[in-house]
Image (spheres, helix red, strand yellow):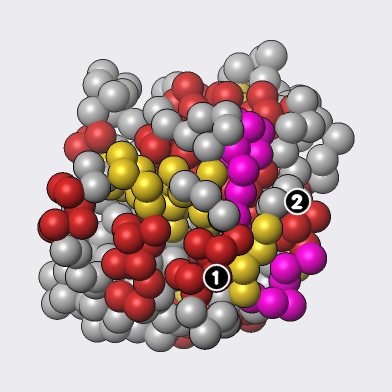
Amino acid sequence: MTTASPGSSLPQQMRAALLIGYGGPNQLVVSDEVPVPVPGQDEVLIRVAACGVNNTDINTRVGWYSASVAAATADGGFGVDDPVAAAWGSAAMQFPRIQGADICGTVVVGPDHLVGCRVIVDPILRDPSDPDNRAQVGYLGSERDGGFAEYVCVPLSNLHPVRSELSDVELAAIACSGGAAEHMLARAGVNAGETVVVTGASGGVGTFLVQLARRRGARVIAVASAEKADVVRAIGADAVVPREAPDLIAEVRAAAAGPIDVVADVVGGAAAFAGWLELLRVGGRYTTAGAIAGPMVQLDLRTLYLKDLSLFGATVFPSSLFADLVGYIERGEVQPVVAATFALGQIHEAQAAFARKAHTGSIVITL
């Protein structure tokens, strides 16, 4: 192992945002006296340049993953009656925890050929002895400390050097949103010539869904607020339907003007779910990786089986998918959309802005 500057030492302490418990923004405390982590065997130390903000950060903080929560995602705490059920993984969260899974930075301690390399990080923590076992995974910023800090240690297997003219901020908008989007489309088997409806198309995952579906040769009908329609259209949507439409399902059907093969939904909620299934052609597919409008829906099983529909959840993507995503980025086949940046000391403001959902694309913390 070497450091980026032989003969000089790394600081012993760093600035980091510590999540000290479940609840509202007051549970995030920024400190300048957090020990710099020391990489273990098969790990590297990264100097963080930027780290994206994601739904998972807020959902974990507020305890939204608890089965007792039926409401839409929000910035305030829900109250946690079962710490294990409220965690992202299979064990209770350990506090304090440094969140942040969308990391771009430079390797400062690691194998010689990697030191000094700009990298992004696969946020899925896999069991080295059984990497394909979805029951044995964790998430960066949940099961181990993440990137809302000046330095972070990550497993060597999660590291991806990236050769791109994109800025650190743009690269920090890729891992979680891009990974989730590509996984949703892969699970649903989206093919060239198919029509895909993308809900929440102006968000971090949504903007990647639009681009990645187009990359696959699909036709994209996007759903976004009217004031964001031009941006969503500019990144590749064939048509944009305002989510404020009095009869959203009818307007999406009219915009598609033909069979709809896939609904890629990150919004969820009871209001539209049944309509999306009705909209799909016989043999159509519904894929989801989020439920910002609420996790509880009503399902008419007759619609499911009489139309031979397939429903896909998408969370734990394979490492090969992330490597493919890095390739798309390096070849310029997709472009991250960044709405705003905040300093680490402004993490409360950054998460509040994210929770308002008024932005287009991703929000990124700069270090």
Q: Amino acid at mark 2?
A: Ile
Residue 332 lies, with reference to residue 56, above or below; the image says above
Q: Is residue 229 magenta?
A: yes
Task: Compare residues 341 and 196 and report the one nearer the observer.
Answer: 196
Task: Compare residues 349 and 148 and report the one nearer the observer.
Answer: 349
| Res 203 visible | no
Give the number of callouts.
2
Query: Which residue is drawn at the image coordinates 61% and 17% (left, top)?
Result: 111
- Write down the region rendered in magenta: 213-230
Q: How many residues crowd around disc 2 within 10 Å: few (fewer than 14), some, or many (20 or more)?
A: some
Q: Position of residue 99 (x, y in %)?
A: 47, 59
Q: Quadrant of the N terminus?
A: top right
- Identify the disc placed on residue 173: none
Dot 2 lies on which element?
A: loop
Asked if the residue under mark 1 is in contact with the one under mark 2, i.e. CB atoms within 8 Å, the reply is no
Q: CA distance from mark 2 to mark 1?
A: 21 Å
Q: What residue does disc 1 label?
A: 251
| Res 238 visible | yes
Q: Is residue 142 left or right of residue 98?
A: left
Residue 154 lies, with reference to residue 177, above or below; the image says above
Q: Is residue 89 magenta?
A: no
Q: Position of residue 56 (x, y in %)?
A: 43, 60
Q: Amino acid at mark 1?
A: Glu
Q: Position of residue 258 (x, y in %)?
A: 52, 50
Residue 96 lies, with reference to residue 305, above or below; the image says below
Q: What residue does disc 2 label?
A: 235
Dot 1 lies on which element?
A: helix
Query: Which residue is drawn at the image coordinates 38% and 35% (left, top)?
Result: 187
Q: Quadrant of the C terminus?
A: bottom right
For marks 2 and 1, the one nearer the N-term is 2
